[in-house]
Image (cartoon, rainbow, N blue to C red):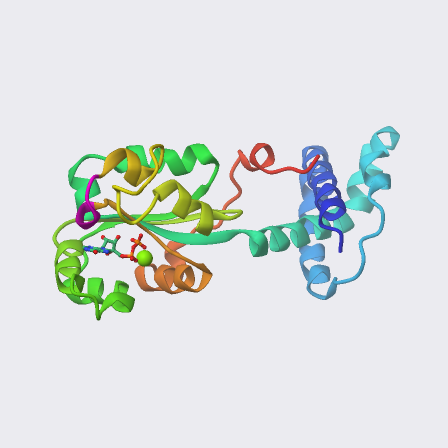
Amino acid sequence: MNTQIYRSASRAARSFLYSASKINKHVVSEGRTAAAAAAISFKGTLPPLASFANSSNTSNKWIAGALAVPAAAYMLQDQEAHAAQMERTFIAIKPDGVQRGLISDIIQRFERKGFKLVAIKLIVPTKAFAGKHYQDLKDRPFYNGLCNFLSSGPVIAMVWEGEGVITYGRKLIGATDPQKSEPGTIRGDLAIVVGRNIIHGSDGPETAKNEINLWFKPEELTNYTSNQEKWTYGVN
Ligand code: IDP
Ligand code: MG
């Protein structure tokens, strides 16, 4: 399916539904329930949405009654597609970043980019937990010291969501060795040596999935639509 057409169609459906909900909340909520049932088996090609978007000269009641169901179906399908598109990554501010008072600076960089925070907590990991997190490095000479360090104090554990957030999160963070990190990156701006590089970020989709599962229970991950999204994403 053509993503661009699909997105515009979904946007039109969403804005339609918003207007319809102002007209008649009861009818629309019934429509949503029906649409939720319909959406389970709804997999076909989308019919044109022009009739939804151009229906302003039609009576409000007719719009809410006749179109709430298909419009809600589009919206639900859009939410599913949107959720499926949106990547998540695990980001942690290590004990050095927390102790140096860099939490807000780091979070601000992800927020200002447009990424969405979907989980956050402050925890002191045990050494065994740190060992699990860094298990891929267990043969490296610095592994023991690294695990001691990660478990030496509070860590801000976070999950960030957005298109390309895994790869771009790593760009925001900068190279592992702060001496090689570009200015403008978190490690480039805020750290000097590799042993105190203040932040962790998942390095790929598989790692992101594993690290999110390691640090968070499923119920700790939130799902919400940010008000910014319609301004952060769009195709012209
Ligand atoms: P990354 O954090 O950029 O993904 P990794 O190679 O996965 O880098 O290493 C994990 C962490 O181990 C680094 O962030 C750093 O804290 C630490 N580390 C990596 N290389 C060295 C090293 O050569 N000496 C000491 N610590 C290191
Ligand atoms: Mg790594």
Q: Is residue 40 magenta?
A: no
Q: Quadrant of the C terminus?
A: top right
Instruction: Please determine whether, in this image, residue 123 is positioned above or below residue 113.
Output: below
Residue 177 placement, left or right of 3: left
Q: Quadrant of the N terminus?
A: bottom right
Magenta segment main secondary structure? helix
What range is drawn magenta here?
192-196
Q: Nearer the viewer, residue 162 or 223?
A: 162
At 74% across and 62% down in the image, what residue appears? Answer: 42
Q: Residue visible at 67% across and 36% down?
A: 18
Residue 211 percent across, percent down from the top left: 35, 61
Q: Residue furthest bottom?
A: 139
Can residue 31 be seen? Answer: no
- Could you tell me which residue is drawn at 85 percent across and 34 percent down? 55
Residue shown at 76% from the left, 45% from the top: 5
Residue 99, quarter of the rendered image: top left
Q: Quadrant of residue 124?
A: bottom left
Image coords of residue 83 (percent x, y): 56, 53
Q: Quadrant of ligand 2?
A: bottom left
- Image location (x, y in percent) of residue 13: 73, 42
Question: Toward the viewer: 50 or 86?
Answer: 86
